[in-house]
Image (tube, grey):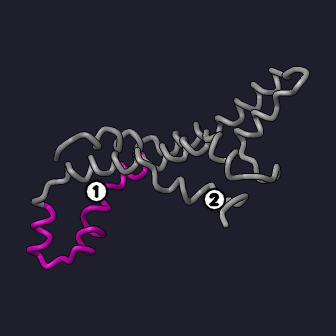
Amino acid sequence: NWIDTHTGLIVPALVHPFGIFMLRQFFLGIPRELEDAARMDGCSRLGILYRIILPLSKAPISALAVFIFMFQWNSFLWPLIVLNSKEKYTLQIGLAMLRGDLGTEWPLVMAATTLATVPLVLLFLVAQKQFIRGITLTGLKY
């Protein structure tokens, strides 16, 4: 039972259509000659994956990780559907709950929204090099 659990929030987010498309485009750009050369050297399919494909795809995978984190950090509808207890609500649902029936404290909402963007900015600054490299390599042929 994944209702009202963190597992229900995390596991469905691990497979994202954008990620499938992005990595597919990157993998199509990897030359077939690299795989053929590794096979001639006696490398197995699993060895080709671990020794050639994964090291080449470090940048797109890190860019995808940043994208998926951003998508899920800003997600509102899925956590609202899955979670029932207020203790497990995400930040976006908490921001929506700041609006009151009689009025809204806009300075409080703006301060909370500003604080909600801090982890996204920090993640981007930490992964900026890999993120930019992953975006530029996704559509290129080697």
**Type of the residue with mark 2:** Gly
In-front residue for pair 71/126: 71
All told, the count of numbered labels is 2
Q: Are marks 2 and 1 in contact (CB under 8 Å)?
A: no
In the rendered view, would you say 49 is above or below 105? below
**Type of the residue with mark 1:** Leu
Q: Nearer the viewer, mark 2 or mark 1?
A: 2
Quadrant position of the N terminus in the picture: bottom right
Residue 65 horizontal/vertical position (percent): 47, 50
In the rendered view, would you say 96 is above or below 31? above
Tell me which secondary structure the magenta stretch mostly adopts. helix
- Residue for point 24% across, 64% down: 52
Residue at image mark 2: 8
Q: Secondary structure at mark 1?
A: helix
Mark 1, Cα crowd under 10 Å, few <14 / some 14-19 / many 20+, is some
Left or right: residue 79 versus residue 55 is right
Residue at image mark 1: 56
Left or right: residue 127 versus residue 72 is left
Measured in 3D between alpha carbons, the distance from the residue under mark 2 to the one under mark 1, in whole angstroms, is 32 Å
Residue furthest toward the right? 102
Magenta stretch: includes residue 35: yes
Left or right: residue 93 versus residue 46 is right
- Residue for point 71% across, 46% down: 90
- Residue for point 41% across, 47% down: 17
Residue segment shown in magenta? 34-63
Q: Secondary structure at mark 2?
A: helix
Mark 2, Cα crowd under 10 Å, few <14 / some 14-19 / many 20+, is some
- Residue for point 86% across, 27% down: 100
